Image (spheres, grey):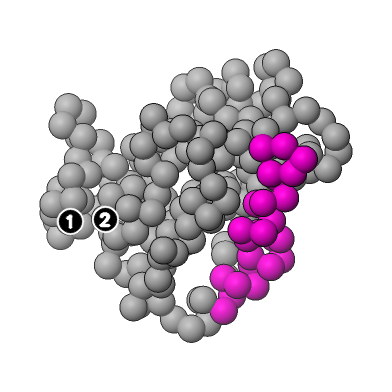
Amino acid sequence: AAPEPPHSARPIELKMWKVVLHKRKMGTSAMKRLLSPCRDYFVAFARDVVNDLQNSRYKMNVHSSRLTPSERAFIRANGGCAPNDGRIDHTVGFYSSHLLRNPSLDVECLSADDVMWHLIALFYRSIDERLPSALRLHGLESTKQIFERMKYWTERMESGHPPEPHKNALGTAALDRDGHEGTSSVDATDQTKEKPG
């Protein structure tokens, strides 16, 4: 079942979230457009979504180094502390069961609902006051990234380009902000400045 909003969510936040989804032409029906005339565009989009989460889940953000003792305790209690280098997993805690966190996922088998619930869960994490600020920021940034992925693959489908990105396309051999090789089809740093809601 689709995730329910956190109790701390304000009605205006949920209303504006629906406005943003409409403005971005984002939803299960929009994702299903990528399934026609073949699944290749949707599979490419879903692969980007899964890869983005794997590439970002341990990446520090502006709040990661400012965790309070209680926030660190929450992350530790949810298994979010890497055993060797002290990094934190920004995908643990509430709504994590809806996130596509398994790197071995067969993206060929993912449905539009799977990806949509992942998107909704990320947004709910961004407004869930029970989560540490670093995890909430990760949710917000990941939500923005999915909007960019959807835009990229929809435009690619509508323009008639093949679903496979060209060799050496941005992200395929590009470097992310930390100098590591990227795996996605568009630059992972190309994020919109607009905050949902």
Q: Which amino acid does label 1 sit on?
A: Phe
- Residue range (magenta): 15-39
Q: Which residue is tagged 1?
A: 74
Residue 153 percent coordinates (x, y): 71, 40
Instruction: Report helix, strand or loop for mark 2.
Output: loop
**Residue 105, quarter of picture:** top left
Question: In the rendered view of the protein, which quadrant contains the N terminus?
Answer: bottom left
Q: Which residue is tagged 2?
A: 93
Q: Which of 166 and 194 is in front in this view?
A: 166
Residue 117 visible in the current orientation: yes
Examine the residues drawn in magenta and state their main secondary structure. Answer: helix
Q: Residues within 10 Å of mark 2 (few under 14, many from 20)?
A: some
Q: Do the residues labelled 2 and 1 touch (CB within 8 Å)?
A: yes
Residue 172 percent coordinates (x, y): 61, 22
146 to 172, vertically: above or below: below
Q: What residue type is labelled 2?
A: Gly
State the residue lying farthest toward the right.
159
Disc 2 to disc 1, C-alpha distance: 8 Å
Q: Which residue is drawn at 15% across and 60% down?
A: 70
